[in-house]
Amino acid sequence: MKIIGHRCPVSALLVLFLASLAQAATEKTIYTFAAPVPGGGDGMQPLCSPVFDTKGNLFGTTLAGGKHEAGIIFELSPSKNAQWVETILYEFTGGTDGGYPYAGLVFDHAGNLYGTGGFGGKNGTGVVFELSPQGNGWSYKVLYSFGATPVVATVLLRTRPLSSIS
């Protein structure tokens, strides 16, 4: 199975699609984000392609939604009954932790996730963050606050080793 894309109309429900690699590719909805609920609920507007971990789980971000309506980091895991289950790993506040992530996530070799928030942080113009697995949960940490909006920051993370970015 391979992710082939997502649909993201602003006023509609958001859907991720999974396609089989059979002769004629078929589309199957694996998860539908819930309608936005002010002050809580699911994420909305997943603008970037999700990434797989080594266990077949999908990880991604949404630009909006969540408790603070500043986006979320989510995990989709296949269950035994062929349904995909969402776990919200982090809900952005849009404050010093950042928020409104325009770019996707990348994994390092230790299983940590890295990404960017387009707003918030010390200067109000975005952050680079790390999400690390700890026990049965995840730990969120801001690594850097930008002085300009970081729309291309994750592209740099994907093309260079983390140790080479200063």
Image (spheres, helix red, strand yellow):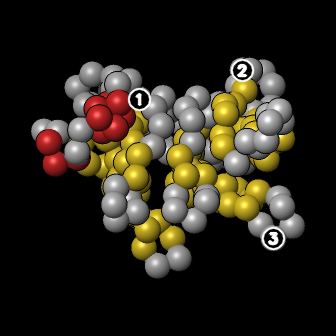
Give the number of the mark in front: 3 or 1: 3
Label 2: state its secondary structure.
Answer: loop
Q: Furthest residue to the front? A: 23
Give the number of the mark in front: 2 or 3: 3
Q: Is residue 115 above or below residue 74?
A: above
Residue 78 location, quadrant? bottom right
Residue at horizontal 82 percent and vertical 59 percent from the top:
83
Q: Name the residue carrying label 2.
A: 10
Contact flag, marks 2 and 3 (Cβ < 8 Å)? no
Q: Amino acid at mark 1?
A: Gly
Label 1: state its secondary structure.
Answer: loop
Q: Amino acid at mark 3?
A: Lys
Q: Position of residue 77 (x, y in %)?
A: 68, 60
> Quadrant where the C terminus lies?
top left
Residue 57 location, quadrant? bottom right
Q: Position of residue 54 (x, y in %)?
A: 52, 62
Q: Earlier in the sequence, mark 3 or mark 1?
A: 3
